[in-house]
Image: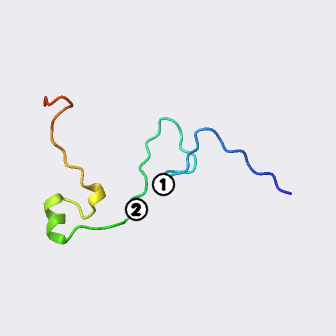
Amino acid sequence: MTKEKPIPPLCITTALPDCPQVAMAYVPFQQMTETYDPEKALHCGTLFPELNKPFCGCRKGGSSR
């Protein structure tokens, strides 16, 4: 009979590392799903719709710096 290792605190099950540490930046792995056609990809600046995050240049409340 083998003993299972206890799960350390702060471990989560996602596309992130097995046990992320506090105050460390992590970027989840991109899941390749659909892609834009080449013309739209050039217009949007990305081939992947999930990475299409337009920047409007405004802060919350409508003011810009």
Q: Residue at x 82, y 56 (%)?
A: 2
Does the residue at mark 2 contact the one at mark 1 (Cβ under 8 Å)? yes
Image quadrant where residue 38 sits:
bottom left
Q: In the picture provided, is 5 more to the left or to the right than 44?
A: right
Label 1 residue SS: loop
Q: What is the x, y in percent for residue 59?
A: 19, 32
Label 2 residue SS: loop
- The residue to which callout 1 is attached is 15
Vertical position of residue 57 compared to residue 51: above or below: above
Q: Residue at x 58, y 39 (%)?
A: 10
Distance from label 2 to label 1 (Cα)?
9 Å
Residue at the farthest front position = 61
- The residue to which callout 2 is attached is 31
Indicate the amino acid at tag 2: Gln
Q: Residues within 10 Å of mark 2 (few under 14, many from 20)?
A: few
Image quadrant where residue 25 sits:
top left
